[in-house]
Amino acid sequence: MGRRAGVVLHRESEQLNLLVGDRPLTFEEFVRRFGEDENVELIDGIVFGRNSAHLTHESLQGWLLRILGIYVSERDLGIVLGSRTAVRIDAFSGRLPDILFVRKDRMEIVKEDGIYGAPDFVIEIHSVGERKSRIVSLIADYIRVGVSEIWIIDLGRKVLRVILKGKRGYRELALRKGVLESAAVEGFWLRVDWLFMDLRPKETEVLSKLLGWRLQ
């Protein structure tokens, strides 16, 4: 383990599942060849398979996707997509965020086969046992294309990493409790501890707080 420029480095042993051709695959070739049923990403022209998500991951993703999707729809703020929508990073790379949001005034970047530009907000869920290098690489790619707000939900450490774009670059917060209001999605907030509960509040209860709904 070494330290340089404030970054702690760890030596990791990780297994990779990848498909390599005789030349780098372009993003356009990638989205034509691989459909929504195939859990893969494109990194530097190489197709990387992603591990199947655990129940905890899927449960949290579904909960967040329903809440954020309904909230954005009700407020007419843009579009929310999840898990199988490719985001173009560059000519030879594409990522599939667990959840992404694009503002209404930037809908021109949303195409039938993917997102051709930086989403305004991305959520990634880091499951227990998932490769650390993938999360580091994800963050680097999202910063490179200019995503305004990134949430990394670390289920193992029970911490929410929030990476925000500002006038002087990016800054990061690490939260375990409290209320977090999104900078990218107007008026949207969540309690951090909800993300790590075994039994989370019902979606209707959360939406009633966000939208002022009256529950029967």
Image (cartoon, rainbow, N blue to C red):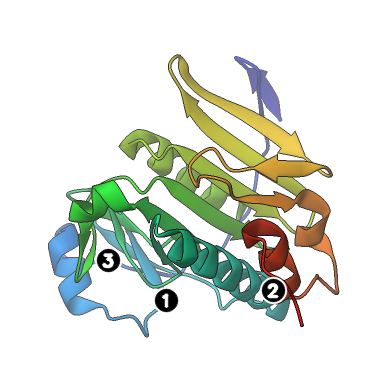
Q: Secondary structure at mark 3?
A: loop
Three-letter code for the amino acid on which mark 1 is drawn: Asn
Is 176 on the left or on the right of 94, as rendered? right
Q: Nearer the viewer, mark 1 or mark 2?
A: 2
Is 6 on the left or on the right of 192, as rendered? left
Q: Residues within 10 Å of mark 2 (few under 14, many from 20)?
A: some
Three-letter code for the amino acid on which mark 2 is drawn: Glu
Which quadrant holds residue 168?
top left
* Residue 68 x %, y %: 55, 63
Is 106 on the left or on the right of 186, as rendered? left
Task: Tell me which label, 1 or 2, sits earlier in the chain.
Answer: 1
Who's the residue at 26% across and 48% down the image?
Answer: 106
Q: Residues within 10 Å of mark 1 (few under 14, many from 20)?
A: some
Q: Quadrant of the N terminus?
A: top right
Three-letter code for the amino acid on which mark 3 is drawn: Val
Q: Which residue is mark 3?
A: 20
Mark pair 1, 2: CA separation: 27 Å
Q: Which residue is mark 2?
A: 203
Q: Quadrant of the C terminus?
A: bottom right
Residue 158 visible in this rendered orientation of the protein: no
Task: Tell me which label, 3 or 1, sits earlier in the chain.
Answer: 3
Is 77 on the left or on the right of 136, as rendered? left
> Quick one: 13 or 91, which is closer to the camera?
91
Mark pair 2, 3: CA separation: 42 Å
Tally of marks: 3
* Residue 39 x %, y %: 42, 76
Identify whether 91 is placed above or below 27: above
Q: Secondary structure at mark 1?
A: loop
Mark pair 3, 1: CA separation: 16 Å
Who's the residue at 29% across and 60% down the image?
Answer: 46
* Residue 190 x %, y %: 71, 52
Q: Which residue is mark 1?
A: 39
